[in-house]
Amino acid sequence: MSTTSEPKKSFHRKKGWKRLERKEPKVIENTKTAIFIKGRNTSKILTDVCEDLALYKKPHVIKFNHKHEILPFEDERPLEVYSTGRDASLLVIMSHNKKRPNCLTFVRMFDGHVLDMEEMLVKEYKPIHEFEGVKPPSATRLMYSFNGSEFETNEEFKMFKNMIIDFYHNDVNEKLVVDELTAMMVFTVVEGKIYMTVYYIKATSTSIESHEVGPRIVMVPGRNKFGAEDMREEAMKIPQELVAPKKKKNVSKDMFGQTIGRVHAIGEDLEQLNKKIKLPKALRESKKEKKMSKK
């Protein structure tokens, strides 16, 4: 008598299944990973800028050390390959040429496709190591401050603000530990330029101390590309599991767990009731007898 059994998954096959499971959509997504990519030509300033930006993103960072032939606004296919292969939805491309010197391109992906991207041209830069004092630890929880009406009215600045918050967004915790909030990124718009500064925050029993720890970057927006409206709506859709159930009106439960419903009836106008009520035959005959007796 022979018995049949399902083939056992090999060790490598199990690893492949686990890798695919990690890439599947989740109700609460993991912290997004960012890839820093060197373009065909780059500069020492851009390399140092990305090192400082990656410091506050650790450990969810992947760095490409070699240069790549990549033009994000001309061909999106390499971005899709890098994003899908490493399960990373954020990319930063470094490029440097005469037309767009010291250019950083921030790219955000959704479902393996480019959702939106925006260029930032670095005009001034002061690295972290040139600042004195205590440095905030890497992988710290950040606070943000965006100063300037452009962050609310201008589409370019609004997208940059949204992308920065998404870029440094950490895991969601139900309980917030105040001691973990040790750094604040401040973005200020002045005459079309974005001034980025980072401060170390320390709370004492009597006051809150802060001092600049770097980096300090001055940027100007360049080219940008907004995602299709249908893709953006899909990316912003809230999973059904996270949507609070609608409260049913006029329905409650008593102390025994039984469902009780309340019905609101419209008040009746008693004046409009039909006053001519047909009496039973016996009562009609008694009324006739009374009338006859009176006569």
Image (cartoon, rainbow, N blue to C red):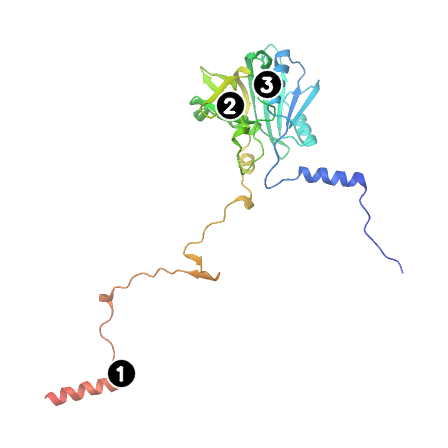
Mark 1 vs 2, N-terminal side: 2
The residue sitting at the front extreme is 205
Residue type at mark 3: give it: Leu
Classify 39 as above or below 283: above
Classify 169 as above or below 131: below
The residue sitting at the left extreme is 295
Nearer to me, 59 or 248: 59
Is disc 3 surrounded by few (<14), some (14 to 19) or many (20+) residues within 10 Å?
Answer: many
Classify 269 as above or below 49: below
Residues under labels 3 and 1: Cα distance? 95 Å
Indicate which disc residue 104 carries: 3
Residue 290, percent from left and from top: 15, 87
User: Residue 262: which quarter of the image?
Assistant: bottom left
Residue type at mark 2: give it: Lys
- Return the residue at label 2: 202
Nearer to me, 115 or 175: 175
* Residue 73 in sight: no
What element does badge 3 sit on?
strand
Identity of the residue drawn at 60% across and 16% down: 49
Q: Split into 4 quadrants, where in the image is the C terminus?
A: bottom left
* Residue 149 in sight: yes
Residues under labels 3 and 2: Cα distance? 31 Å
- Return the residue at label 1: 280
